[in-house]
Amino acid sequence: MLNWDDPIESIKRKRAEESVSEPIATMPPLAADPAAEPALESEKRLLGGSDLTANIAPIKYRWAWDAYIMSQRNFWMPTEIGMGEDLMSLRNLNDNERHTFFTTFATLTTADALHQRNLALAVYERITAPEVGMAVIAQMHQETIHSMSYQHIIESLNFDEDEIYLLYQKVPQIRAKFEYSNAMTRGLQGNQGDLKEYMRGLFFYYMIFEGVWFMANFCPIFSMQRRRLMSRTGEQLQYIARDESGHVSFGRSLIWALWQEVPEMRMEEPEAHQLMHEAMELEVSYAEYSIRPMLGYDIELHHRHVRYLVNRRLLDMGFNPIYSEDEAESLPWWEEQIGFRKEKNFFETRVTEYQAGGALSWE
């Protein structure tokens, strides 16, 4: 042991003596019989790969690595968006707008909480390729940011938290969607579960839950935002929609890769069509309750856009659409809303907001 009071020459001498007496560390020798070495499955696989295959490089699933990198570039924090403008806007909503905003927002809030659980306990559990697992973990983190965003809005607008988070228990049309979701994603859980059930769960989770239901439910609030109502809530939902769009793209790539790697998991078109029809029935019932006529938005526009999303997800997976062009049509401003690029940074925005929305009072 060195003593800091020792002369420098004494310290050098002690180090030299220690270096001679200590053995040089070397790698353990290989077994004399190569057959006695433990067999390692070095090939990466999406499912069923070796637990010892933890190397990220060489990257086999480039689409997953790209999704991970993109998620890091899209990092944002909801508390940097001041909500004072929406606190005043909320007072100016008419009854139909207030009902639509509150119901839609409450549904999105609960849905995002389900996202986190599904990703952590279901999707991620069976993935054995490290770069794919990293992309799923990045999605988990983004979902926590989304939940933080909803909570930030709730606190800033002085909403009753129990009323928001428990609305699904009071409204059968909302509860039916979540009960169906739990039943569909149950097949994702467990490493030894049926591969067909796992695929059904993935298809439902990425193509229906996120790709249709979630994307459609942004639209009523985006419509208000375009009329300068609840603009800051709409801005936060734009960030969330951008993230979710990336999740849908990742899910599409994951499903296609699984079909190539594990052909017996491939889903047939009649099954995909049946799942979409079931999801659409639930969405129609939900929308009939939640969406009331507003300037620039009504139930017919909503239904047409949902049908467009259903067709788009089916085409993404190589299936035929189930609705004709006369029945399905995207909202003209949809791509603009979810494909936005923020030209100002958060710090430039924040200096114009001298108080957080929750600290303001308009009484």
Image (cartoon, rainbow, N blue to C red):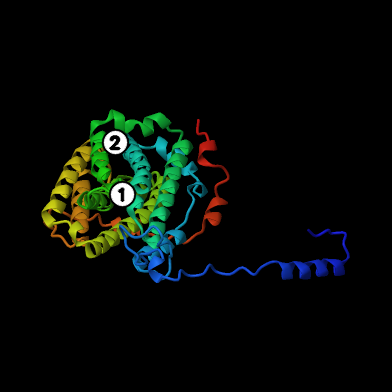
**How many neighbours does mark 1 have within 10 angstroms: few (below 14), some (14-19), or many (20 or more)?**
some
Residue 284 at what x, y percent from top left? 18, 41
Asked if residue 319 lies left or right of residue 337, the reply is: left
Q: Residues within 10 Å of mark 2 (few under 14, many from 20)?
A: some
- Residue 35 occupies which quadrant of the picture? bottom left
Judged left or right of residue 24, residue 195 is left
Residue 222, relative to residue 99: is it above or below?
below
Q: Contact (CB < 8 A) between labels 1 and 2? A: no
Total of numbered circles in the picture?
A: 2
Mark-to-mark CA distance, 1 and 2: 47 Å
The reply to whether residue 337 is visible in this rendering is: no
Q: Which residue is mark 2?
A: 96
As helix, strand or loop, the secondary structure at mark 2 comes to: helix
Query: Which of the 4 image quarters holds residue 323?
Result: bottom left
Give the residue at x 42% y 49%.
236
Q: Amino acid at mark 1?
A: Asn
Q: Secondary structure at mark 1?
A: loop
Residue closest to the eye, 201 or 218? 201
The image shows residue 97 at horizontal and vertical percentages of 32, 38
Please say if 270 is above or below 152.
Answer: below
- Residue 279 x, y percent position in the rendering: 19, 45
N-terminal of the pair, mark 1 or mark 2, is 2
Choose between 278 and 362: the one closer to the eye: 278
Name which residue type carries label 2: Asn
Q: Residue at x 42, y 61 (%)?
A: 54
* Disc nearest the viewer among 1 and 2: 1
Tell me residue 183's x, y (percent).
24, 40
- Residue at horizontal 41 percent and vertical 66 percent from the top: 37
Left/right of residue 73 with respect to residue 328 in the rendered view? right
Q: Is residue 357 above or below residue 55?
A: above
359 or 128: which is nearer to us?
A: 128
| Disc number for residue 191 | 1
